[in-house]
Amino acid sequence: MGLGIYQTLFALGGGFGPAMAATFLAARQGAETGAINPFFTANSAPPPYSDALLLLTAAALVSFVATFGLKDSAAKGNKG
């Protein structure tokens, strides 16, 4: 049962992640405003792409934090 849940979440994440990034990119391209990304420089990619990469970086950081948090809680649960 656990493997089925894992595969379902993997499939949902594989479809949902790129769809959200593409939606964000399309919205930023339509806005025609400056970059949200504070690390953006004028010589790099267009502002919407820089902002989309910043969004994906933030999502990756959240997943790393969640992974380490789950690892710590699982270790505490095994000791008790």
Image (cartoon, grey):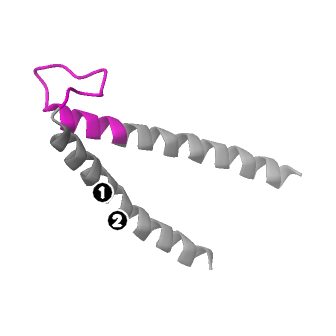
Residue type indicated by callout 2: Gly
The outermost residue toward the right is 80
Question: Relative to 15, is 48 above or below?
Answer: above
Quadrant of residue 18 in the image?
A: bottom left
| CB atoms of marks 2 and 1 within 8 Å | yes
The residue that disc 1 covers is 18
Q: Position of residue 80 (x, y in %)?
A: 89, 52
Query: Which residue sits at x=37%, y=61%?
Result: 16
| Closest to the observer, 75 or 11 | 11
Q: Is residue 48 magenta?
A: yes
Q: Does the magenta stretch include residue 26?
A: no
Q: Where is residue 40 in the image (x, y as percent from the top left)?
A: 23, 23
Quadrant of residue 49 in the image?
A: top left
Circle number at residue 15? 2
For the N terminus, the quadrant is bottom right
For label 2, the SS is: helix
User: What span is in magenta?
Assistant: 33-55
Residue type indicated by callout 1: Pro
